[in-house]
Image (spheres, grey):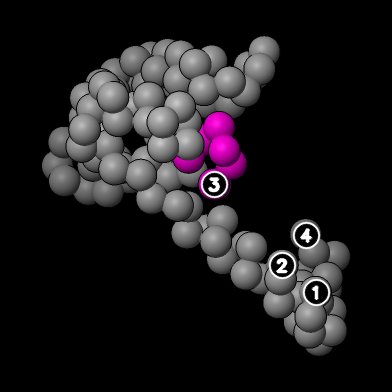
Amino acid sequence: MRFVDKISNIKGRLFDIVHVKNTTTATLKKELSVVLSRHNFDVSNIRSQGYDGASNMKGELKGLQALFLNDNPYAYCLHCFAHKLQLALVAASRKVIPVHHFFFQIWLLL
């Protein structure tokens, strides 16, 4: 989560990892709302959402983004740029052998 603290500093934090029984939008919204409230974040203060493009996340009518937009019209949705970059790199590495080799070598170092 990225947020602005009381003295206007932009912060980024991983708040929680939660096991869910299923990945329906209702379950995801409920669990995410619980995590936010546990850390004293109010859903009405959300100003943007970023998801990976899966249908249960981005669906304009029933996706998670839509459920949060129903509660807060200022929670605009953006496609996660890190995910877009990863998709582009995967596509490039499949077509260009030196790029594939480069990322494979990096993976071996991890």
Q: Can residue 38 be seen in this view?
A: yes
> Does 49 sit left or right of 42 as displayed?
right
Decide which of tag 3 and tag 2 comes sooner along the chain.
3
> Does 66 sit left or right of 83 as displayed?
left
Q: For residue 11, which quarter of the picture? A: top left
User: Relative to 82, is 19 above or below?
Assistant: above
Residue that mark 4 sits on: 110
Q: For residue 105, which quarter of the picture? A: bottom right
Residue that mark 1 sits on: 94
Query: Could you say where residue 60 lies in the image, as x and y percent from the top left?
Result: 41, 37
Q: What is the span of residues highlighted in magenta in the rendered image?
A: 53-58
- Amino acid of disc 2: Val
The rendered magenta stretch, by its main secondary structure, is classed as helix
| Neighbourhood count class around disc 4 (C-alpha, 10 Å): few under 14, some 14–19, many 20 upward | few
Query: Could you say where residue 46 lies in the image, as x and y percent from the top left?
Result: 26, 33
From the viewer's perspective, is the residue at label 3 or at label 2 nearer? 3
Residue drawn 56% across the image and 56% down it: 83
* Label 4: element kind: loop
- Amino acid of disc 1: Arg
Residue drawn 14% across the image and 42% down it: 7
* Label 3: element kind: loop
Q: What whole-number distance in Å separates the C-alpha atoms at marks 3 and 4?
A: 27 Å
User: Relative to 99, is 52 above or below?
Assistant: above
- Amino acid of disc 4: Leu
Badges 1 and 2: C-beta atoms under 8 Å apart?
yes
From the viewer's perspective, is the residue at label 3 or at label 4 nearer? 3
Disc on res. 90: 2
Q: Nearer the viewer, residue 23 or 66?
A: 66
